[in-house]
Image (cartoon, rainbow, N blue to C red):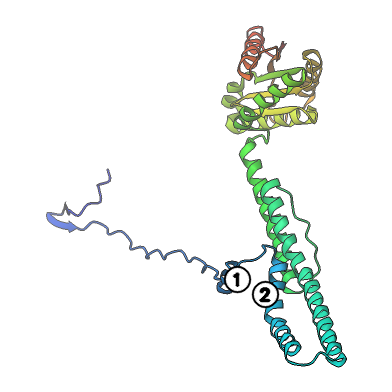
Amino acid sequence: MHGNNTDSVTHISKQGTEQLIQPAQPEARPEARPEARPEKVRLPFYNLASKLPGPKNTAVRIFMFSFLGTQLPMLALLVYILMSVELTAEVLTTFSIVLITALIGSASTVIALIAYAEPVNAISKAMHNFTVHDHLPNLPEGYSDEIGELMANTQGALKKLHSMLHNMHELSIRDELTGLYNRRFFSEQSEQLLQRATRYGEPFTLVFIDMDNFKLINDRYSHQGGDHALRQIAKLMSDAARGTDFTARIGGDEFVILFQNTPLEKSKLQVDRLCQNMRQYDWSALFPDFVPTMSIGMAQAMENDTIETLMDRADANLHKAKHAGRNQIVG
């Protein structure tokens, strides 16, 4: 029996001599270093400029500040000259040339600002569409300047983030063993699908599937053999399913199928096809002396049904199939 690791000592007698045994000291762990955080980006000039009054459009603000900074001194000089000298034809001509040149320069500045503001606006729009509508960006590529690199980096980052979020979502709604939808996602979607069918007056059928003698498979062929059986049945269900069918594993050996816009009789044809595939599959590689079967209960939605009442009727039919000898469809 192992003793507790305390500060006391333990006396052990050996060949008449007491030896003092000191408890083992825990190995010293290196001190955990605080996680390094990236330094917060500071934008002092932008912070100042953003607080100044004026329009919110970036290109217009840049043009306004650059125009005031570059053209205002010259315009003030022209006004001073006009007020201080005689307005001769030569003075007016000079004034006109300078004014036209200034306007051309200002127009060129506006065009340049619009050109460089376009990528920024495109990035802002792409970020908005990704955040609000989950739309992947389609920013132009092939530009080697800093703004071009910004667009390329934004495009790559958003695509990577979208892929990660998609994978995380799939992991959260899929059953790890079979790849079918899991019980939580079934609970979320089934009620919505039933409400939609009720709203549009469409038939809606629920199918409950339970493997027969699943405990026997686990006992005879181990739990790994049971997992193989569940995965293969899930594959057969996926192969037989149509694009609108909803298949999920909701328990150990329990599965459910939702047939949208499909009445009970047509749903039975789909279930018969699944059962036929089940019988035709060669199980001998997994179970040399055993052939798995399924008991199935079905129910079509009626007026004022909820997903719970519909499942209760399908489950009752499943129990009838079990009591009637298993490997049957009741509905």
**Nearer the N terminus, badge 1 or badge 2?**
1
Q: Amino acid at mark 1?
A: Ala
Q: Residue furthest front?
A: 86
The disc at residue 49 is 1
Disc 1 is placed on an element classified as helix
Q: Residue furthest top?
A: 324
Q: Nearer the viewer, residue 269 or 228?
A: 269
132 left or right of 104? Answer: left
Q: Nearer the viewer, residue 161 or 149?
A: 149
Q: Is residue 189 visible?
A: yes
Q: Is residue 289 visible?
A: no
Total number of numbered discs in the rendering: 2
Q: Amino acid at mark 2?
A: Phe
Residue at which label 2 appears: 65
Q: Are marks 1 and 2 in contact (CB under 8 Å)?
A: yes
Q: CA distance from mark 1 to mark 2?
A: 9 Å
Q: Give the residue drawn at x 83%, y 79%.
A: 104
